[in-house]
Image (tube, rainbow, N blue to C red):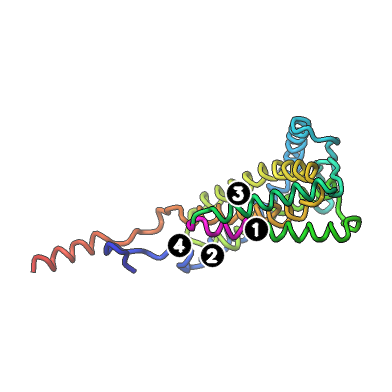
Amino acid sequence: MRGSRGGVIGEHRAMVSGRLTPSRILSMAIVPLLLSALVALAFRPLGALWRIMLERLVPWLGLPGDIGVATESIGAMLSFQVPHVTTPAPLPGVWHFWAVGGICALVLAVSLLLPTRFLPLRYYLRFSILVQLTSVLYFAWRPDSFPYALPEYTLGFMQAGCAVLFLIPLVLGLTYFPFDIALWRKVLLTAMTVGHIAVLLPLQVLLHSYLVHHLSLLVLPTMFFLWGLLLEVFVFVAFYGWGMSWPDASRRPPALGGERRSRKGATAQ
């Protein structure tokens, strides 16, 4: 395929099927398992770091409640502690409905004023308004039947985040490791993805706790559906796309030199 200036556009690595050699199959099967095992072993010190982070940031944000700790286990060999925020959140009152409604109106206005090049963001903002209005209708109809509390939500979020961290090497082993990329780059991309989400997770929980505590449980469904684990998926896809664009010395670039020589020969004739 040629570009607008006549240059050769090679196929992207993600569109090229590589050969599954025995060594590559071995790396796909063993290396991700070893990396997931390392992630599991890191949960104990990581839980301690999360707890220190939450204990310092929760008072700084002015949130009430202590830092709760739940003990989790992977089989009978490994157990670790998962910290979470115990800040309570009230059921929505009249003031909360007006505040959230005003925020929805402001977001709608922003989505209408954004230029055309931000069309995906415009649709995302409007979809978030739709989700939030669904929550408003639910709480206006049956506010006492909402089955979730903020401390339970933060604990479940942290537990789900641990599961995501554990699964990242395995998913990359199936989707990234089969390609013709140096092994050290595959390991590096896995470590960067896990490290990024490990830092993002407690900060995300803090942000959700702050907003739900001040705006009531009315915004908790929106936090979960639009800015919950969906952000972790976005992070994974972003790192994956970046890793697929890395140049690799084992792949030869398009033979532009030969093409130029042939053009010069044709010109001379």
**Horizontal and vertical percent position of residue 201:** 70, 45
User: Which label's residue is closer to the chain start, 1 or 2?
Assistant: 2
**Which marked residue is nearer to the observer: mark 1 or mark 2?**
1
Q: Main secondary structure of the magenta part?
A: helix
Residue 13 is tagged as 4
Residue 8, above or below 107: below
**Horizontal and vertical percent position of residue 209:** 77, 43
Instruction: Determine if the magenta segment contains residue 241.
Output: no
In front: 39, or 217? 217
User: Which label's residue is closer to the chain start, 3 or 4?
Assistant: 4
Q: Verify CB contact (< 8 Å) between mark 2 and mark 3.
A: no
Identify residue type, mark 2. Answer: Pro
State the SS at label 2: helix
Q: Which residues are magenta?
A: 116-128
Identify residue type, mark 3. Answer: Thr
State the SS at label 3: helix
The quadrant the C terminus occupies is bottom left
**Which marked residue is nearer to the observer: mark 2 or mark 3?**
3
